[in-house]
Amino acid sequence: MLIVKNLTKSFGNIKAVNGINFCIDKNGVTALVGPNGAGKTTLLRMISGFYMPDTGEIKINNFNLIEERLSALNSFAYVPENGALYQEMTVIEYIKYMADIHNLDENSFVDNLASLVSELRLQDVLSQKCYNLSKGFKRRVALAGALIHRPDTLILDEPTEGLDPNQKFLVRDFLKGYGKRHTVLISTHIMEEVEAFASRVLLMHHGKLVCDTTPDGLKSLTPANDIETAFRSMTFDK
């Protein structure tokens, strides 16, 4: 579970996040959407512990991120847009390194590795150096490393950006399955992605949460019943 209460963050005179409140439980994927500069990445960086909020509270799996930082950080995984791999490691070395960070025992590592390799189709690249991987494989390896300890909460920034249609389908299908048993929050600006596998939409604009609904609920806000039209109507600054 992820709980955000009255979260704010400013950079000089710019209020990047302004009084955000929401709660996300299991049983689905929540999509955080908004135009460039809406505050999505700043919000994710606060939730993941990279930024300290000016005000507000974040609870991850009932751990307060400020007061119980280590317990909170150990209970979730965050994958930034660039993936953040160690390029000189092989894929298996990287995933094992991530497992060791979380003190995962050998039996759990072997079991989790086997399922992740199968689900994300990494069988053919385990011995390859990370710098040799395609963008699609880098995304999947970063996801496998983040999930090797099976965290209760998963947070992803633009998880399918730049992937080909087959890779997008694979990642989306995996995340839909993971979201049935865990809390999943993704940031995206791709409305096709929201319709494809999100069950809830949080729409940000100018640092504020302006809509909390479902993909169908967002579409219904315009006569055209089109999600991109609805997005533009709520975020386009004339």
Image (cartoon, rainbow, N blue to C red):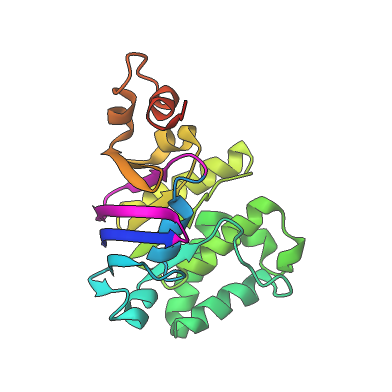
Q: Nearer the viewer, residue 83 or 48?
A: 48
Q: Position of residue 234 (x, y in %)?
A: 37, 30
- Within the magenta stretch, is there residue 135? no
Q: Quadrant of residue 213?
A: top left
Vertical placement of residue 35 versus 74, above or below: above
Q: Position of residue 41 (x, y in %)?
A: 48, 55
- Within the magenta stretch, is there residue 31? yes
* Quadrant, the N terminus: bottom left
Does residue 45 appear anywhere in the picture? yes
Q: Nearer the viewer, residue 66 or 142?
A: 66
Q: Of all residues shown, which one is farthest toward the top? A: 223
Does residue 155 appear anywhere in the picture? no
Q: Which residues are magenta?
A: 11-36
Vertical placement of residue 225 versus 134, above or below: above
Vertical placement of residue 6 versus 57, above or below: above
Residue drawn where x is 38% and y is 77% of the image: 74
63 with respect to 151 (left or right): left
Residue drawn where x is 77% and y is 62% of the image: 132
Q: Main secondary structure of the magenta part?
A: strand
Residue drawn where x is 26% and y is 74% of the image: 64
Q: Of all residues shown, which one is farthest toward the right? A: 132
Q: Position of residue 181 (x, y in %)?
A: 30, 57
Q: Position of residue 57 (x, y in %)?
A: 26, 67
Residue drawn where x is 57% and y is 73% of the image: 95
- Tell me how many marks there are: 0
158 with respect to 72 (left or right): right
Q: Nearer the viewer, residue 84 or 28?
A: 84
